[in-house]
Amino acid sequence: MSIDWHERARLLTPDTRAFINGRQHTTDGTFTTTSLANTSLANDGLEIAECSDHDVDLAVKSARSAFDDGRWRDLPPAARKQRMLAFADLIDLNREELALLETIDVGKPIGESLRVDAPSAAKTVRWYAEAIDKRYDEIAPTTPDAIALVTREPLGVIGAVVPWNYPMIISMWKVAPALAMGNSVVLKPAEQSPLTAIALANLASQAGIPDGVFSVIPGLGPTTGRALGLHPQVDKIAFTGSPETGARFLAYASESNLKQVALELGGKSPHVILSDAHDLASIAETIAWGIFYNAGQTCHAGSRVIVHPDHQDELIEHLQTFLRDFPVGDPLSETTSMGPLVDSTQLETVGRYVTIALEDGGSIAAQTPVAKEGTFYPPTVLTDVPANSRAVREEIFGPVLIIETAPDDDSAVAAANDTDYGLAAAVWSRDIGRANRVARRIRAGTVWINTFDAADITTPFGGFGRSGFGRDRSLHALDSYSALKTTWTDISH
Ligand code: NAD
């Protein structure tokens, strides 16, 4: 039976309070989020708790007490695992509501929120839960008169600060491994997308995650986010967002307690299509999904194509065909593939970059017409934009694809690496050896060969250069929420 998502949205009464120390927390101040889902909520906006320095302090101190008294980290690993599995089950059970909250906040098509974002959040929590009682620590090969244990100790209080483009997915990439290692977490969602974070904290509490271990502090970046970044009792900030804000968190750390900082930042990911690539129709379709999914608001979106000149015309024809019937529209309709941009600021930014590209000599090779109402930007393919244009060099974070050409592998690699970013890339070639040789030379945290955006919780994700440092996902993420400790015992007497 199909769900009437508009009706569901109309009946929804989201919790807009902070969640601190195991309970809902009403703040003195609020801020307004605007929803794009064209529901009754959309017109009014929602008043969301705005956490002050005092509220942030409460959340961090409760996280610190929970860590210090061992109510979570000292539970037997199997018990922590069970509670995190219960949390994952509750996410699955509530996936329709979580998906709707996500779509209402950010305009993401409901079909994607339901089939990708909510299940992915549950899967991440389940995967790290399962890891808890399956990893061993080490005994160092010292001299026979000693036993030296090398153990992974949780860091303490983790401040997780996340953006609005994949709120549930990115939050759980940080919260789940941090909790699995026994840390406490204070999560600061983006101002555009607080609703699922608040709901998730409530579910975690219902699942038996103890008070203070997982709190959510909605608020504005320069106030709430800053207070978390500067807090002397936070041991690590796990951040995803823009390079500019990432730099601020490094400054907050140096101005406060030298807390650790991990930064997952933006990207300008290139596809490299070599001369021997075949089946351009299917390549074009993959490229189109890689830039138009989530309206291009994806950090690793494949926003550049570097194609052998022989293939350029055919590739553009296929992209034109793809865009002709691309369903852009109401995010509460399950047949929509692309919704609006998150807000009017983002709409202005994307429009500005396309103007720059055109002023610099670029031209529009394909575009899908969209509704004028709302913050929709038409999916757009550009050619002839000079390599030094800001549109080629900077992250647009919208549904805009720029096509460049390169006549041989060396110049394709040079063009791919001619960026300050280094998050992801793709290489297309029939010759797997050649594709791997090119992939090796591209400086990016992930390089796909003959595919794009294939991902799994088992593989690390993060970047080089202006894309930041630190890796989410995989068992390696557990190491980033722990520190090695040596316990040396003299057994000679
Ligand atoms: P943003 O940097 O503006 O905001 C991210 C978070 O930081 C939000 O929670 C925000 O409230 C907070 N913040 C903003 N200003 C702050 C300040 N002065 N002090 C403390 N906190 C502050 O980024 P955004 O616009 O929400 O997200 C888009 C960016 O995120 C893009 O650059 C995108 O590429 C990047 N991103 C990267 C990844 C990745 O994994 N590499 C994933 C998703 C998004």
Image: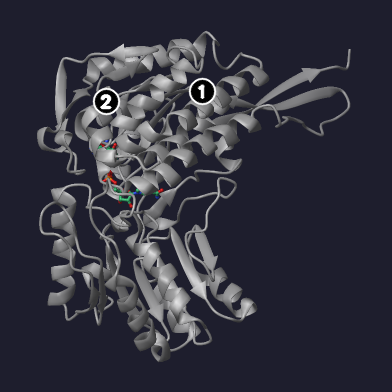
The residue positioned farthest toward the top in the image shown: 69
Up/down of 169 relative to 271, above or below: above
The quadrant of the picture showing ligand 1 is top left
Instruction: Please give the label number shown on residue 183.
Output: 1
Q: Are marks 1 and 2 in contact (CB under 8 Å)?
A: no
Quarter of the image where the N terminus is located: top left
The image position of residue 166, as x and y in percent, is: 36, 44
When asked about the image quadrant of residue 401, the answer is bottom left
Q: Amino acid at mark 2?
A: Pro
Local crowd size for mark 2, using a 10 Å CA cut-off: few (<14), some (14–19), many (≥20): some
Along the line of sight, the residue nearer the viewer: 474 or 243: 474
Q: Amino acid at mark 1?
A: Asn
Query: Which mark is nearer the camera, 1 or 2?
Result: 2
Of the two numbered discs 1 and 2 on the same chain, state the one appearing first in sequence.
2
Residue at mark 1 to residue at mark 2: CA–CA distance: 28 Å
Instruction: Please give the label number shown on residue 14.
Output: 2
The image position of residue 199, as x and y in percent, is: 36, 25
Local crowd size for mark 1, using a 10 Å CA cut-off: few (<14), some (14–19), many (≥20): many
Way the structure is coloured: one colour
Q: Residue at x 55, y 79 (%)?
A: 429
Residue 15 visible in the displayed image: yes
Quarter of the image where the C terminus is located: top right
Q: Residue at x 26, y 25 (%)?
A: 14
Residue 260 visible in the displayed image: no
When asked about the image quadrant of residue 291, the answer is bottom left
* 443 left or right, relative to 25: right
Along the line of sight, the residue nearer the viewer: 213 or 328: 328
Along the line of sight, the residue nearer the viewer: 20 or 230: 20
Up/down of 231 relative to 270, above or below: above
